[in-house]
Structures are given as structure tokens and as C-alpha cells.
Amino acid sequence: MSADLNKSPDEARTALIAGVGCYLLWGFLPLYFHLLSRLGVGSWEMIAHRTLWSAPWAFLAVLLARQAGQVAAVLRQPKTLLILACSTAAIFINWSIYVFAVNAGHVIETSLGYYINPLMNMAAGALLFRERITREGAIAIGLAAVGVAIQTAALGHVPIISLGVALSFCAYAILRKQVKADAQTGLFIECAYLAIPGLLYVLHLQSTGAGHFGAGASVTTLLLLAGPATVVPLALFAWSARRMPLSAMGFLQFIAPTIQFGVGVALGEAFTPMRALSFVFIWAGVAVFAYGAWKRARAVAA
């Protein structure tokens, strides 16, 4: 049964708005880090503040979802805590690659990673969970593989940033699939794991005079916004995903990399004809993937 069969039109519309909103926020996120970089904030400091200020916002999400009891239950489950520690490492790697790539002028490469991520998830599902790959899915994965190969030729090396972004987020999704807890609960535990080293690094920077927190109203406000910039789109995603068909979320998830791609081009990143050709294959794979999702949705509705 699809996720929206028992939902009112108003709730379905609100879920759609929340879903679009989360992907819009993710799409324009490179501009946030680009602005911090122009104010002199380094990548590690950005990551530290992101991990630090995400924790209180994630706790607020837990309270709003009334999941404090679930958090307490998870804290008594060593196996779940271990899996969440592993997913924390995966998302930290993803955040680090992303922030460093954006600040180094590789937004287009990160967008490629998020384009191929759902296709990589599909392949991982088949390999690890014996999920069936449809004909459209196989074609989409094949087209994406060709796109990555062309991107390798265009760059002169394997697109490590794109693959790193996609692989780390795919690993995160696989690990979170094993956690029997709601999204807000898991996110809070992950943020709690990261908050302590984040706080220690921020205190180190401030004590040595290298930190930017308190150096001015603009930069301090932007650093504080690292929390909601991280947690709000995740909360919107979690809320909408529970109220929308997966096929609809499958369409929406390509909003973010499309905006990121546009941001990269607008920032003047190199976009050669060879790189354009690689994206043609990636976009073709995305189109086939979206068509497959639409066809499955029609079959369920019939």
C-alpha cells in the first residue's frame, strides 16, 4: 500500500512541500559553505561547528517527535549503539568530503555523486539484501557507469570526490537500514557522538586565536546556522518520507544535485564538453530510473 493512500489532500500537499523543501535546502547548501569560506572559515572549522550545533537541534527534533523514550531505549542497546557509531563514521566521512570539495571548487563533482547515489543504493540493495533490480534499474546503472567512465577520462583520474560522496552515503543508508529506531532518534545519537570531538576542536581553535566564533556578528550567526542547516532538511525529509510514496521521493531526490550542478556552473567551475557528455549519460540514467519509479507507482495504484 502506498504511503499516501490514507492521507488527506491537505496532508499529502504538506508532505510534498516538505519533501521539496528538504531537497531545495540541500541543493543550495554549497552556497552556505562558500560564504563561510569567503569569511575565512576553514573546512575543518565548518565541520566542527556543524557537528557541534547539530546536536541541540537534533534533540529538539526528538522532543517534537516525542521520541525521548525511544532515545532512552536505544541507549540501553549496545548493538544498536555500535551500528549507530558506524553510521556516524559514514556520515562524518560524507560531510567531510562534501565540505572540502565545495570549498575546493568541486561542487559539480559532488552533484555527480548525489546523482549516482540512488543508483548505487539500488545496486547495493541487490547485492546485500537480494532486492530485485528491474530492467529500467539495470539500464540506469549501466548508463551511470558509462557516465562515470567518461568523467574519469575528462578529469584524467577517477572521480574520487563523486564516488566518495556516493559510497559514504550509500554505506550510511545501509547501516541505518539495520537500526530499529526512527530517523530523529538515530540522528540525535549520531549528532551526540560527533558533538564532543566537535566541541573540543572548536575550543582548541578559540583558545589559539584561530577560531572565528565571536569574531563578528555575521560569521558567528552563520556558524550557529550550521545546526539548523544540517538538521532541518533531514527532519523535513524524515517527515515527508513517512507520508509520501517512495516513488514520489525517488523523483524529488534529484532536485538537490540538479541545483548543486547549477551552483557549480554559476560559481565558474570548469565544465568541458567531455564532462558535459558524462552528465548526459548520468541524466539519461536518472531519467530511466525515474521512469521505472513512475511505472511501479502506476502498477501499485492500479
Image (cartoon, rainbow, N blue to C red):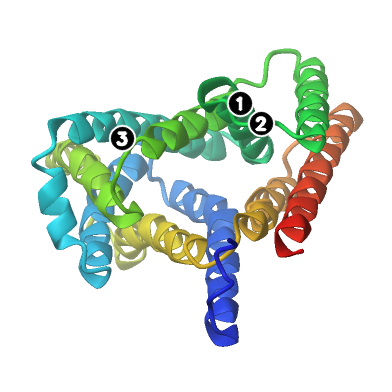
Q: Nearer the viewer, residue 79 or 191?
A: 79
Tell me the quarter of the image containing the N terminus.
bottom right
| Residue appearing at x 88%, y 27% in the figure | 274
Labels 1 and 2: the sequence-earlier one: 1
**Dividing the picture into quarters, in which one does residue 141 lie?**
top right
Q: Work out which residue is located at the far top of the displayed protein and give it.
A: 157
Mark 1 crowd level (few <14, some 14–19, many ≥20, 10 Å Cα): few
Q: Is residue 281 left or right of residue 132?
A: right
| Residue appearing at x 77%, y 64% in the figure | 302
Q: Nearer the viewer, residue 149 or 143?
A: 143
Q: Position of residue 129 (x, y in %)?
A: 52, 27
Can residue 212 be seen in this snapshot? Answer: no
Q: Gap in Å between the C-alphas at discs 3 and 1?
A: 24 Å
Instruction: Find residue 126 and name its label.
Output: 1
Mark 3 crowd level (few <14, some 14–19, many ≥20, 10 Å Cα): many
Helix, strand or loop at label 3? It is: helix
Q: Which amino acid, mark 1?
A: Ala
Q: Which amino acid, mark 2?
A: Arg
Q: Which amino acid, mark 3?
A: Thr
Instruction: Find residue 88 and name its label.
Output: 3
User: Nearer the observer, disc 2 or disc 3?
Assistant: 2
Q: Position of residue 224 (x, y in %)?
A: 29, 60
Labels 2 and 3: the sequence-earlier one: 3
Residue for badge 2: 132
Q: Are marks 3 and 1 in contact (CB under 8 Å)?
A: no
